[in-house]
């Protein structure tokens, strides 16, 4: 043990200790200088390596590899080829003379609303399902992926124990006194339940197909208000029910299954356009591929029966110079189960999804897929002219809501009304442009309402 010299009894202990440490330091340095230069350099190199490893070390997570999606598709392919120029409406109707006794008919709501920010995704909050919990690997995702995760917390996770397929089967099975000659589906992916526009669409469906069964796949219609809307239909003997969407069941064994799984995990940017609208675009394709039948938007007013139509899509606009269609629309789709064109539509959605461009995953999607197919064999379908489902383009939809002005305008209204009543199967109201328009007395829409309504002048419209 080191002791302070006796010649300095008043020197503090700490000062003595400091002198001792300085002597020890000089001894260590002297020892190091006595070592060979090569050994000294090796020690410095080892220290540098250790320091660099500790500073620049990166932890790279390796998430579990997702199982590949089985491509178990068995599309029913019939002879024929697509035509960019449609057949005449009367010819298409007569060529499909065989009625679809077991046809499945769908009407899915497209949220034709103005651009909705993805911060408005709580449209799923009312679902009884929740998204899978975050894991440790999620923390190590890139910043962009974490951003998507935050925006998608409200997307529901549908367990396989969902009663969706059982309830659908039981509902369509009916009983000894009632049966479903036509099967309709509607979907509403929104926090809002049906309004007057959607109720009128329902009335027009049952007015044209009184023996139909209607299933509303919705996260908002299974509510007290939804029950109030459906009650008058049930009381009058119409078969209708509301059910929560089961995405896992509907998307299973399609390209939509893997895409939706990536969406839930935050690997897909939902974009700025309403996610409900884009899910509707995908739901209609998957429903038709799984069941076959007819899909229509809930802002489509049905004027006549669709029973004679098969494998049909409607043109929205036409090129006046060539007479060929220039854009198709997905508000009305009529296809057999496992139709190869539906397979192509779903594949295109999963591969090219863009949530920041309105229409990219809907009308533009079906247009570019059909255009690419050209005259390839194995795709048997018909493109109907705009007058079949879209007698008035979205840019002129106001004309249907206006009453007669002068004598010339009155003559035009009567001529247009007779044309729609005689040659159109349905009228798309283009909800995005017409939702705030009032129906004026004597307008074309007022005449269509009186022809298609079931609860005319009833208190139902006040809901």
Image: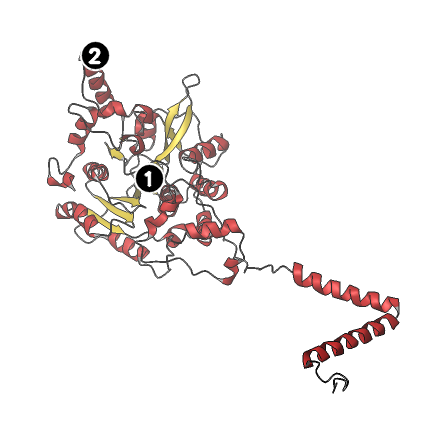
Please indicate, yes or no, whether residue 72 appears anywhere in the rendered image: no
**Residue in the image at 43% along x and 61% along y:** 133
Q: Indicate the quadrant where residue 236 lies.
A: top left
Q: Which residue is mark 2?
A: 408
Q: Is residue 98 left or right of residue 266?
A: left
Screen quadrant of the C terminus:
top left
Residue in the picture at 19% in, 24% down: 443
How far from the left and from the top, in percent, is residue 442?
A: 16, 23
Q: Which mark is residue 176?
A: none
Res 111 label: 1
* Residue 431, x across and y down, in percent: 29, 33
Q: Position of residue 248 (x, y in %)?
A: 39, 54
Residue 66 visible to the viewer: yes
Callout 1 environment at 10 Å: few (<14), some (14 to 19), or many (20+)? many
> Outermost residue toward the left?
458
Q: Is residue 182 left or right of residue 459?
A: right
Rendered position, 406 above or below 189: above
Report the residue at 35% width, 53% height from top: 246
Depth check: give the residue in front, 307 or 247.
247
Q: To which quarter of the image does residue 192 belong?
A: top left
Q: Tag 2's secondary structure?
A: helix
Q: Is residue 225 above or below residue 382?
A: below
Q: How many marks?
A: 2
């Amino acid at each position: 043990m080191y002791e302070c010299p006796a010649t300095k009894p008043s020197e503090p202990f700490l000062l003595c200790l400091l002198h001792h440490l300085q002597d020890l330091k000089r001894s260590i340095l002297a020892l190091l200088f006595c070592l060979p230069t090569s050994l000294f350099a090796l020690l410095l190199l080892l220290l540098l390596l250790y320091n660099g490893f500790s500073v620049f070390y990166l932890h790279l997570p390796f998430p579990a590899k997702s199982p590949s999606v089985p491509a178990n598709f068995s599309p029913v392919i019939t002879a024929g080829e697509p035509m960019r120029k449609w057949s005449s409406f009367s010819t298409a109707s007569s060529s499909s003379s065989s009625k679809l006794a077991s046809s499945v008919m769908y009407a899915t709501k497209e949220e034709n609303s103005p651009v909705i920010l993805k911060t408005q995704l709580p449209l799923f909050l009312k679902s009884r399902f929740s998204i899978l919990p975050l894991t440790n690997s999620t923390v190590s995702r890139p910043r962009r992926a974490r951003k998507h995760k935050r925006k998608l917390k409200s997307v529901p996770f549908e367990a396989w124990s969902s009663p969706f397929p059982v309830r659908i089967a039981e509902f369509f099975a009916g009983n000894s006194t009632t049966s479903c000659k036509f099967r309709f589906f509607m979907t509403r992916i929104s926090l809002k339940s049906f309004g007057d526009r959607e109720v009128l669409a329902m009335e027009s469906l049952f007015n044209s197909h009184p023996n139909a069964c209607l299933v509303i796949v919705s996260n908002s219609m299974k509510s007290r208000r939804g029950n109030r809307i459906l009650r008058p239909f049930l009381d009058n003997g119409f078969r209708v029910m509301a059910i929560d969407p089961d995405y896992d069941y509907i998307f299973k064994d399609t390209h939509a299954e893997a895409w939706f799984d990536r969406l839930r995990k935050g690997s897909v940017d939902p974009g700025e356009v309403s996610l409900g609208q884009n899910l509707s675009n995908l739901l209609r394709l998957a429903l038709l591929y799984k069941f076959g039948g007819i899909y229509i938007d809930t802002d489509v007013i049905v004027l006549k029966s669709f029973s004679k139509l098969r494998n049909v899509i409607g043109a929205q606009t036409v090129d006046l110079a060539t007479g060929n269609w220039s854009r198709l629309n997905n508000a009305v789709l009529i296809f057999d189960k496992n139709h190869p064109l539906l397979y192509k539509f779903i594949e295109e959605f999963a591969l090219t999804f863009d949530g920041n461009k309105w229409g990219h995953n809907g009308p533009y999607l079906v247009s570019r897929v059909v255009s690419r197919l050209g005259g390839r064999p194995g795709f048997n379908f018909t493109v109907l002219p705009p007058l079949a489902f879209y007698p008035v383009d979205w840019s002129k939809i106001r004309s249907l809501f206006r009453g007669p002005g002068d004598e010339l305008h009155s003559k035009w209204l009567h001529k247009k009304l007779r044309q729609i009543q005689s040659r159109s199967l349905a009228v798309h109201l283009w909800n995005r442009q017409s939702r705030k328009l009032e129906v004026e007395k004597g307008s074309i829409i007022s005449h269509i309402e009186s022809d298609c309504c079931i609860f005319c002048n009833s208190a139902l419209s006040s809901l």
